Image: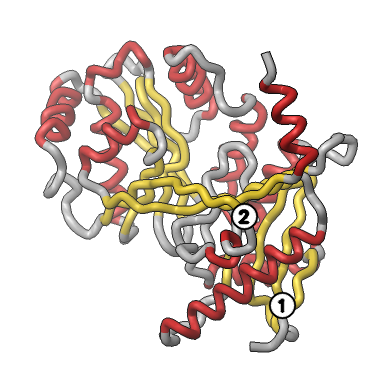
Amino acid sequence: MARLEVRELGKDELQLWDALVAGSDQGTVFHTSNWLFKNASLLNQVLILLGCYEGEKLVGGCPLFLSNRSSILRLAFSTPRLTPYGGVIASGIGSAKQRRKDMHIWNITLSIQEYIAQKRLEYVNLVNSPGLTDIRAFTQSGWSPEVYYTYILPLENDPLKDAAKDVRQNIRKAQKQGIYSIVKFDPDIFWDLTVRTFAKQGRKPLSSRAHLVGLLEMIHQQGIGEMRIAYTPSGEAVAADVTMWDTKMAHSWAAAASPEHLNTGASTLLCYDLFNSLRERNHKSINMMAGNTPHLSTFISSFNPKLVPYYGVGYSRLKFNLAKMLLQRP
């Protein structure tokens, strides 16, 4: 393979970036330029897209969100808040044999890793999508690995075919109470349910209202997802889910439920209706997320999805480590 060049992409190269995302096994809706730049704008962060070129061809890349220039420490992340995946993407090479595939991924990840290392950032964290299973170019260069988990549910068959017994029971319970779900875009309802969900756990939401609503509006306007809300017969919203999609699968991006109605089966019915709706539109699978949160994992695993690992990598320099130690001192 020819020597690869890594450089920051310009605004005039965003179409090339999005074409790479669409054709990459690692690319997701969360890698698209619209999603990345919308987050950067809402969070007032600096975003750069690293492009890996083989001659004139864009063959790989990685998004990086940088800390503000006024910050004492220079930090970089591949995933802003409310974004599950970022990290490295590579162009597809069809039915190539394993050795060629390995070398393709190795050369791209190594080139990106070396470019980032040259920037002398104090801390870097990349969370890759489940499509990137080979992080050896990072770990063999001294980066620290981290393993995360998600659940992916195939949608070819009836979602109840292999589900646990309590799934059917909860669906019947919700139906007997007259609970139903519809596709409806209502950011106010979703924010209210989100606040109440986190308040029950004694926590604040993971993002501001402006950030969440800004992303919801973009999802709705661009047609890259939908909101489904479960209601009681009296019209009270008791659960909601926002699902996004790309060319590979659907993604259950965010969900929230009324603490007062957790035992009604509304969330289970909402999921069931969502799965059937996606099946009718020929979606082959849905990424249910939630693999890293114990109480959510218990709920999601009741549908019998496949547990899938994905990998993060990172490194930190002495200045960052010292600052972290000082902050942790009593």
Q: Residue furthest right?
A: 70
Query: Where does the C terminus fall, quadrant-wise?
Result: top right
Q: Mark 2 is on which residue type? A: Trp
Quarter of the rendering occupied by the N terminus: bottom right
Residue type, label 1: Tyr
Crowding at dot 2, Cα within 10 Å, few <14 / some 14-19 / many 20+, comes out as some
Mark 1 / mark 2, whichever is N-terminal: 1
| Residue 206 in the image: above or below residue 318 | above
Left or right relative to 291: residue 63: right
Q: Secondary structure at mark 1?
A: strand
Nearest the viewer among 44 and 54 is 54
Q: Position of residue 190 (x, y in %)?
A: 48, 26
Q: Position of residue 118 (x, y in %)?
A: 80, 61
Q: Residues within 10 Å of mark 1 (few under 14, many from 20)?
A: some
Q: In the displayed structure, would residue 247 be above or below residue 195?
A: below
Circle 2 residue: 143
Q: Residue at x 56, y 18 (%)?
A: 204
Check residue 53 in the rendering and tell me which mark sits there, or answer none: 1
Residue 192: x and y, percent?
A: 50, 18
